[in-house]
Image (cartoon, grey):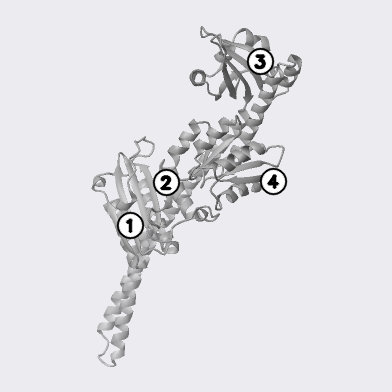
Amino acid sequence: MSAPKLKDPSLNLLLVDSGGDGPTLLVDRFREAGYTPVWHRVGDTATLRDALTTQTWDAVLCAHGIPGLTALAALRLMRDLKLDLPFLVISTTGEEKAAIRAMKSGAHDCLARDHLERLVPAVEREVREARHRADLRAALAMLHDSESHFRTLASNLPGMVFQLVRHSDGEMRFMYVSEGCQKLFGWKQHDLMESSERFFGAVEQDDSLRLKKALAESASRHAALNWEGRIRSRNQMRWINIHSLPHATPEGELHWHGIVTDITRSKDIEGELRRSREQLSELSSYLEGAKEEERERIARDIHDELGSLLVAIKIETALLASKLPVTPAGLKQKAASIETLLDQAMGTASRVARELRPGILKEFGLPEAIKCQVEDFAQRTGVACRAQTDDGLDGVELEERTSLALFRIVQEALTNIAKHAHASLVAVRLTREKGNIVLEIRDNGRGILETDMAKPKSFGLRGIRERIHSLGGEFSVAAGEHGGTHLALRIPERPGVDTAPAEEEPQQRLF
């Protein structure tokens, strides 16, 4: 189930980007969702100002890190022009701190360029809210001309329009609430206007503390109030959103003019999506477990039955070779050739059994199993590959599923490198940092593109990401500083236990 689309399929989008295929990728998301976007790209302050002052836009999508035009600068320009447009930041890996600063400065949302699933819903939400805010401003402006006209308009707005006043003595009081109050909460208008405590008392206790804190922050900074929380009404729990702008009066009072909307449906959708994600994760874990059991059975059959059979054949061949006459000489050579082939078959069976279910993982631990896997990879592919493990891992007993997941990730990563990277050097490092197990794999191959990670059948990376998610860890894959690909993941030693994040470490130490 998805959020309702905007009634108008056309969207006017202003894309702040330096160029390349980034704008096209964003616009394609809206086309896939059924919209017919009209878009324009700007790349510097002058063209951005011209576009904002000469045309009307539904939303601004700003790529972070444009030379000479940061997201913060674009926000300041919009504030200078007194424009209230949905402003969404499109960031890339490594720009999280800058994106957070942009959010604190007024950006409505921040999305990762390699995870654009939320792009269309986020724009729909912000455009819808922006239009609601525009309606609210229009209603307040019309109040000076006609009180009756304002009341008619306000009563038809979705949700409840309100004017909340904080007097100089700190008392809170609703000076006005629209008729949407009764439809939203089942309360009469005068009930709220007589006592604001009726409203604040109906807010869930945990959310009430957040609401008071948000009001205090809005009052101190004279910033917009945008709060979501739960409220009890008609013996039901509802989710509401309060969006309001504060206005200080010469008498020392603070007025919030805003709107309360019912977002219960969107929260229910979020809950359904979250539960669906949890169920898919549980299913994935179950399938992985079943697959590991099948691998173990096949490995046991290869080791016990096929291995025993090959050993028996080798013994019989050796006995037969010892009884062959000296002449003709070709028979002895043929027997030696057969023994060599049997040695190769036994080595292959042993390697396949180790890959299916590495006994070394149980006997000697994860570091030794990874070293063995790296050696097998180097021998099989001819690619120079080395492993580095931290001495701090000695004596650390990881859960079986954690060790197995990390081993499989190394297997999958090395397989991808062999297939796609065209690398001549691979480095694998396993370390322990502040209660976390950190695994890094880097190669000097052709590198990885965002389009590679977004391929519909890119199941290798998706499988790695799902394994890490099930263990409560973090995962990233990006281009290396000096070419190639850098894969990094971090999981807690004991899944479910919070651990402190470690400081970033230069990639050069891998080589």
361 relative to 166, above or below: below
Q: Amino acid at mark 4?
A: Thr
Comparing 403 with 91, the one in front is: 91
Residue position for label 2: 475
Q: Amino acid at mark 1?
A: Ala
* Front tag of 3 and 2: 3
* Residue at left offset 23%, top offset 48%: 391
Give the crowd class for mark 1: few <14, some 14-19, many >=20 residues within 10 Å: some
Q: Amino acid at mark 2?
A: Phe
Residue position for label 4: 36
Q: Number of callouts in the render?
A: 4
Give the crowd class for mark 3: few <14, some 14-19, many >=20 residues within 10 Å: many
Residue position for label 3: 177
Contact, mark 1 vs mark 4 (Cβ under 8 Å): no
Comparing 281 with 463, the one in front is: 463
Q: Amino acid at mark 3?
A: Val
- Which element carries disc 2, helix, strand or loop? strand
Position of 5 compared to 17: left or right? Answer: right
The quadrant in which the C terminus is found is bottom left
Q: Quadrant of residue 484?
A: bottom left
Q: CA distance from mark 3 to mark 2?
A: 48 Å
Q: CA distance from mark 4 to mark 3?
A: 38 Å
Q: Quadrant of residue 126?
A: top right
Residue position for label 1: 427
